[in-house]
Image: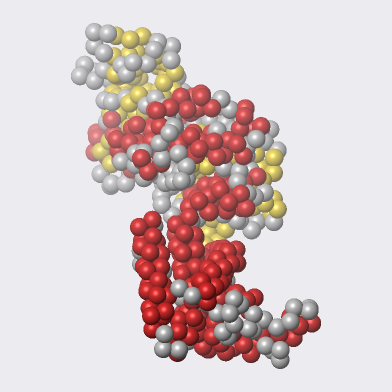
Amino acid sequence: MAEIRARFRKQFGTFRLDVDLRLPTQGVSVLFGRSGSGKTTLLRCMAGLEQSADGYFVIDNEVWQDGRYSLPTHQRSLGYVFQDARLFPHLDVAANLDFGRRRAGSEGQRIDRAAIIDLLGIEHLLTRLPDRLSGGEQQRVAIARALLTGPRLLLMDEPLAALDHARKQEILPYLDRLHEQLAIPIVYVSHAPEEVARLADHLVLLENGRVSAQGLAAETMARLDLPLRFGEEAGVVFDATVLARDAEWHLARVAFAGGELWVRDTGAAVGRHVRLRVLARDVSIALSETDSSILNSLPAVVDDHAADDHPALVIVRLRVGGMPLLARLTRRSAAALHLRKQQQVWIQIKAVALIG
Amino acid sequence: MSDGDLTAILLTLRLASLTTVILLVLCTPLAWWLARTASRWKAPIGAVVALPLVLPPTVLGFYLLVTLGPQGPVGQITQSLGLGVLPFSFAGLVVASVLYSLPFVVQPLQQAFAAIGNGPLEAAATLRASPLDTFVHVVLPLARPGFITAAILGFAHTVGEFGVVLMIGGNIPNKTRVISVQIYDHVEAMDYAAAHWLSGGLVLFSFLVLLALYALNPAARGNYRG
């Protein structure tokens, strides 16, 4: 069975990392947690940059660490993208890109250099020195540099954390493209719900050095029992397909497992797979289908509910077809509607974000 | 300028060049270790390396004379190896100069290495570079300003030494009589004109060296002690 198996224990003063994970060898696994939850340490253990005395790390039957045996970092077929790009300041962009590629030998030669440069849109930067690049450009070069070694595993440590909002929006589309076009597994550390929603296929929640939940991103994000939620950003993500585009209203009709929705037309072609995000605060519940300004109204079944961060609020989980959705309402509204499990209701979705 | 002056100048340049080369080779691993280690030996070894900064050169010269001399422990070894004794020879002068100028080469290198930090080393490791490969292709280029500073300071400081030379080298023409000793001789002989030529030349040389250091390498400004 192709999988990534990671077991690490490490003590840092009073902090203790203790994880045992199985990650898929496809798609993006996001390690999510607050700062200090151990997510970066875990990633560094995977890379061999941090030594865990009693660690075990296997990718596709290739053992990188087993107890005291630990393959040195430079012999591991991995790419690592640091928070700060860490380009070599004495080398221009092209030489930075070729630094790892040359050393990776045949693995690096397998990778189409021009295609990676094109994928990250850095063709026009090749002769520049790193200090002549913006933060976003540096990070794109760093990602390309890591990919050009032809790694079996790409590790990314909050690659967007050091960038401002505009630079983040500049890089996210490139990350979407990586996600779509590359076959290698990516382990991505983040504390930003937006990035989780956009990129995660598999989600691991870390708290105080331990795994508090993990699983498919859509399911894990819709769980009500998790001690670590996304606060204001609570919501679900799911995949959909573009069915039609309405030129008059600039809307697109998309189909997902629970039905069909109208979303703002972002130019995605008919037939394309898109990822949608629905925040709990944008979902309201009605007992019947009513006329309103809200475009998206769907029948749903109440599944469960849980207390929210504020005592005035509850989070309700509903099922639309087979899909879980979260709705945030006041406790007063929930009481007025007499909501109970398995009740048939209508949900109104005020906003659906199309995220790549 | 007399033949004696010219001989002294050539001897000084030979001594300073050789000393600088030996120091760069010796100090690169030492400075790397001092910059990277968390060992409890870091402080004592760092202090020993810095000793020549504060000791009077005569003290250093005196102990070297005792250690390298015929009765000293190192002297016994060099004699049993058939190398004779080092004091009052050019080789002895080189050994003394290396020790005397050590901190002027170690410290700029150590600071340059420390300033690089872990970031580039870890990045290189994730790009398949072995530690030696990383040292040659990442650390050395990034530490280049430190190497320039270290070489210039090591060379200039060796040119300017006097006390150690007098103690360990004596005053033998074409063997140990360097510029500073030659100036001393001129002054003792009341030949102030000759002393002026050499002294003025040394002032000019030192000024040019420091000018080159500051102009070529602005980052080095105030980056060393001494």
Residue name at image x 57 percent, y 39 percent: A100
- Residue A109, x across and y down, in percent: 62, 29
**For residue B141, above or below residue A123:** below
Residue in the foreground of this view, choosing between A141 and A27 = A141
Q: Which of the 4 image quadrants contains residue A318?
A: top left
The residue at the point 50 percent across, 27 percent down is A116
- Residue B18, given in percent of the width and then of the height, sits at 58, 67
Furthest-front residue in this view: B2
Q: Nearer the viewer, residue B53 or A280?
A: B53
Give the percent coordinates (x, y) of residue A152.
61, 35
Q: In the visual, does A76 lie left or right of B225?
A: right
Q: Residue at x 68, y 33 (%)?
A: A1
Of residues B31 and B189, the one nearer the viewer is B189
Looking at the image, residue B151 lies above or below residue A352: below
The correct choice, above or below, for A218 with respect to A163 in the image is: above
Q: Is residue B197 left or right of residue A100?
A: left
Q: Is residue B108 left or right of residue A289?
A: right
